[in-house]
Image (cartoon, rainbow, N blue to C red):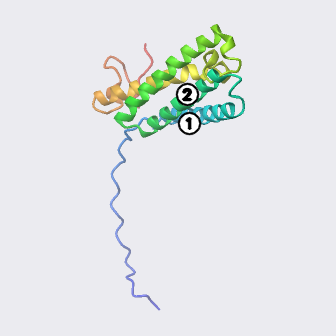
Amino acid sequence: MRSGRSSVSEPAAAPEPAAARPESTRTGPGRLLVAVYGLFALSASARAAVQIATKFGHAPVAYLLSAFAAVVYIIATVTLTAGSPTARRIAVVSCSVEFAGVLAVGTWSLVDRATFPDATVWSGYGSGYGFVPLVLPVFGLLWLRYWSRRDRTGGTAESAVPADTETTSAGTPSAPA
């Protein structure tokens, strides 16, 4: 017995317009950047918490600097994930503080080894972490610079490429000839 429904199928819904390009630093290469910052936020936080809780008197400066690094990584992770213009400005400050911190603490840890009987995330310019702490803020600042230029040029990826740069059919910059 039929349920009273019509056997004529309903017309298909109109196709949705193409999704707009996301306006966020967490897209494309930004995803990897956010993931690495998140990993460093987690590892630096855990390291600092264990060191401060178990042996703070042994190397208080080193452990407090690890905690400071953890806070910087957390701020960078959150602001890069948010991706709003205000968050990007905060991320620029965070990445800049991180870079200055890696350079300052890296130099300090090599000059005054007595102050750093245990390593921090940034000591030796991040040598204990494969120098990732040294290059990560550089990549972060470059990514944020790309977004800043993109915002100023009208919001398209193509307009963020300098006018004298040739592009491929996919709209990406080609190698110089």
**Residue at x 56%, y 19% (from the top left corner):** 134
Please name the residue that numbered disc 1 is placed on. Answer: 38
**Residue at x 39%, y 35% (from the top left corner):** 87
> Could you say where residue 79 lies in the image, as x and y percent from the top left?
44, 35
> Could you say where residue 20 lies in the image, as x and y percent from the top left?
35, 44
Quadrant of the snapshot with the C terminus? top left
Q: Secondary structure at mark 2?
A: helix
Q: Amino acid at mark 2?
A: Phe
Please name the residue that numbered disc 2 is placed on. Answer: 68
Residue 91: mark: none
**Residue at x 48%, y 26% (from the top left corner):** 140
First along the sequence among labels 1 and 2: 1
Label 1 crowd bin: few (<14), some (14–19), many (20+), radius 10 Å:
many
Q: Secondary structure at mark 1?
A: helix
User: Which numbered mark, 1 or 2, is in the foreground of this view?
Assistant: 2
The residue most toward the front is: 57
